Image (cartoon, helix red, strand yellow):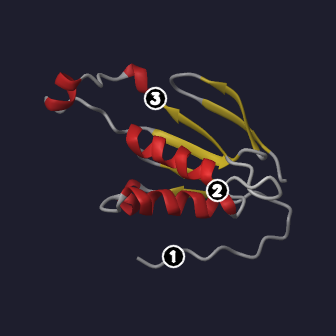
């Protein structure tokens, strides 16, 4: 699948990458993480239609921590809804196919995104331009 090319940034806006579940289907975990972090490194806000598995979220945080640079990349801010604890994630629930992976995830540079409010139906964030 060809990569999207971003228009030239004139410094007056924030680019938001909305990534469909279809695009992420079939990718290995590290490929998903690279797509996300490459966008965030560029200063973009990344929104995933279907979110990541708990293991992928943990790995994303691990890779992010390894890439933090005091003079450059400050890390990520990540918010997901619905909240994970609202689902049946027990072993029996997963075996019976009751694990719900449909969730929206918002990821952005830690120095540009601040979560103002989060509940089961809404993520409200303030996004600033560096």
Q: Earlier in the sequence, mark 2 or mark 3?
A: 2
Examine the rendering and report whether any part of residue 69 can be seen: yes
Image coordinates of residue 93 in percent, x first then y, are 20, 24
Q: Which mark is residue 82?
A: 3
Where, quadrant-wise, is the N terminus in this rendering?
bottom left
Q: Earlier in the sequence, mark 2 or mark 1?
A: 1
> Tag 3: Cα neighbours inside 10 Å, few (<14), some, or many (≥20)?
many
Q: Which mark is residue 3?
A: 1
> Tag 2: Cα neighbours inside 10 Å, few (<14), some, or many (≥20)?
some
* Circle 2 residue: 67
Label 1: element kind: loop
- Residue drawn at x 46%, y 29% as measured from the top left: 82
Q: Residue furthest front?
A: 66
Left or right: residue 52 versus residue 68 is left
> Tag 1: Cα neighbours inside 10 Å, few (<14), some, or many (≥20)?
few
Q: In the image, which is nearer the foreground, mark 2 or mark 1?
A: 2
């Amino acid at each position: 699948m060809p990569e999207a090319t971003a228009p030239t940034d004139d410094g007056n806006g924030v680019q938001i990458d909305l990534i469909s579940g279809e695009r992420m289907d079939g990718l290995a975990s590290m490929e998903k993480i690279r797509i996300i972090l490459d966008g965030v490194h560029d200063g973009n806000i990344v929104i995933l239609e279907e979110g990541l598995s708990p293991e992928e979220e943990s790995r994303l945080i691990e890779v992010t921590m390894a890439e933090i640079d005091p003079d450059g990349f400050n890390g990520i801010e990540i918010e997901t809804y619905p909240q994970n604890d609202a689902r049946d994630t027990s072993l029996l629930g997963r075996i019976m196919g009751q694990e719900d992976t449909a969730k929206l995830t918002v990821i952005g540079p830690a120095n540009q995104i601040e979560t103002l409010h989060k509940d089961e139906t809404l993520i409200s964030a303030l996004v600033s331009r560096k």
